[in-house]
Amino acid sequence: MASNMRALLISGPYNGLLGPASDIILMGSVLERKGFILTECSGLNATRDGIKSAWSKLVQQCSDKDVVVIYYSGYGGLVQSSIHLTPDSEHRANGEKVPWRYQFIVPIDYDKTTEDDFRGVLDVELSHLLRDTTQKTKNVTVILDCCHSGRMSRDPSLGTKAVPRYIAEHEHQRIGEYVEILREKGELKGETFLEGNPHAVRIVACNTSESAFEYETTSGSWNGAFTEALAQALEESDGQEVSWSTIILRVGQLVNVRFPQQHPHTEGPHARMPFTVKETSRSLLLRIEEGVGILSAGRVGGVLENNVYAIYPFTTGAGNSKSQIATAFVTNVSGFRSRVHLEFEGKEKCIPAEGAKAILEQEALYEWPIAFPAEVEGLQLLVDESEYLRPRNADDKDPLAVIRQSGPTIEVVNSKGIPISARTAHGPNSLPQVVNDIVIDAEELARGQHLLGLDCESPEERLRHRIKIDFGLVVKGKRGRKIPQDGTGYLADGDRVYINLRNEGDNTVYISLFDVNVAGQISYLSRSSPTGIDLESGRSYTLGAKDLDRELAGLPVTWPTQVPRKRKVDETLVAVVTSSPVDIGYLGKPRSETEVRSSGKAAGTQSNLEQLIDTISSARPRTIGAEEDSPSIRYDFIQIPFTLHTTHADSDGLHTGQAG
């Protein structure tokens, strides 16, 4: 039987969400060019029954050779029972534990939910539909552009021009009973995979604790940031042998320019190449072309400038130092090819005619693209030499920042159009210093963006915890207005704040607190606890409190030094929660102290988290594989975005002293 490529595109425009309609057009055009037969379930047809019926019909049509894509764009949500026996489960009559909380996607008729009929499509139902699909064909990809976060977060700097794809958490007293009824009806027959379906690639717009955003584009249309980036990455990689995991790295880079708090990721067999069951090799092909070493992959394939590769013959395995031909240092990267400098290891100073395989040994820091005027003397050279920045090229839709000149003044403007630094040359002799300082300012923005974009690289590393953060103003020595944690909160220059940390979990954790302002400058707030604030189970700690007095002094809030005081700006509180003590405070060292902006530890003695922080702080390449023998530290990141105003006069009539 001949194979078919089938795609089901589901858009959920519930409650007037604008992006899904544009998203399925965009994703549909990408898939159609790849040969997929498209089926849409959208608009008024995207009811609970309509979505399930469309998916079931697709399963019926499939054969074992078919390629299947299920794509959803819309709201996600979280539903929990209002009656449960423990914080994590309720029990069936026989004592068996079943989940009391479910994620779900939101059909157009979700508002018709009653106590007897829940109209969302639950994750357990999606798991059964996916199992039925992979029983017909093993070549399945599920793409979800939504979020199920229990903690919705808005982007304060974009206001109404960006919204998260999440609806408020819903309590349904009989949700557990409702799932049992579905089982009795035969809608949830059989068992699904406990650790996720191993036959399907699952691509999601963000982690479960994050928000997935849609935003108004410059053309006036609304699109999901994830869908837009995924479409671009798939187009870029067309014809290239790259894995889903590599493509999603590229998607993350594109999304993080605007939304650094959103982290797309893959689950399942992510080493597969898109829409196939074939997995990519971890090695790249190296050939000599016109006397120059060329890797057969570029930026789209995950290669970065300054990466280091070990070069081996095809006939030997990696890791055998005696068979290593050379070490390759990446000097220039285009979309699909990379130029390398070769340093040979033995007497043979050549690469075999058939080429050789390149294995990644050290991964460099991603260099953010920026746009700048080429006519400014010395600017091109400094950007080329930077370990944080690179010139914008044709592959980059949005630069991290734009450097522009107006007379003797040079300024850096971020991706949201906010000037974050302005420096003026007083005569030609001062111009070189101004250019140097403006590049340093852009590098600080890049460092801050890297911290905001950090995420756990594997589920095994993610720390499960129950840390609660209470963040608010100090007014006359007491707690005043609380800062909401959904991105709608605001502060003003001159305010003082407290930060209360509470451990409601069972295990001791350690918390390091940072502030990242609009210019990317990172401030280390918990410097009195160099290896993290030690919080045992049930304990709390307040930053901004006097040691021997109940009165709160508060931490001062100040306007970023180089940022013009023209408009409100965004800022983010970042908490790094770890399972063990770890010193990462050097990340908040000022630029003038670059020589101490690293842990000083050898790569083999660092945890993966320490390597990530070291790479951001010092641009030191990360050694691949070193973490296998290094200390294991589980970790998580909590971000609280807010808006910073110059004064309370521009805070929409709200007042500092309002009680929370």
Image (cartoon, grey):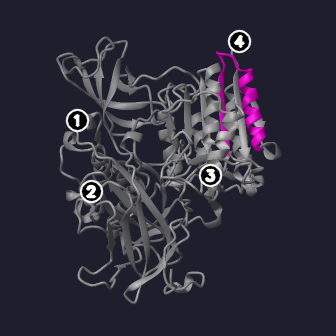
Q: CA distance from mark 1 to mark 4?
A: 48 Å
In this view, the mark in front (2 or 1): 1
Q: Position of residue 513 (x, y in %)?
A: 34, 64
The residue type indicated by label 4 comes to: Ala
**Looking at the image, which residue is at 35% across and 64% down?**
514
Q: Which residue is mark 4?
A: 2
Q: CA distance from mark 2 to mark 4?
A: 56 Å
Identify the mark nearer the N-term, 2 or 1. Answer: 2
Q: Which residue is mark 3?
A: 77
The residue type indicated by label 3 comes to: Gly
Identify the mark nearer the N-term, 4 or 3. Answer: 4
Q: Is residue 458 visible?
A: no
Range of the magenta residues?
A: 47-73
Residue 204 belongs to the span the image colors magenta? no
**Looking at the image, which residue is at 38% across and 52% down?**
636
119 or 4: nearer the viewer: 119
Q: CA distance from mark 1 to mark 3?
A: 39 Å
Q: Secondary structure at mark 1?
A: loop
451 or 184: nearer the viewer: 184
Left or right placement of residue 238 versus residue 469 in this view: right
The residue type indicated by label 1 comes to: Asp
In this view, the mark in front (1 or 3): 3
In this view, the mark in front (2 or 3): 3
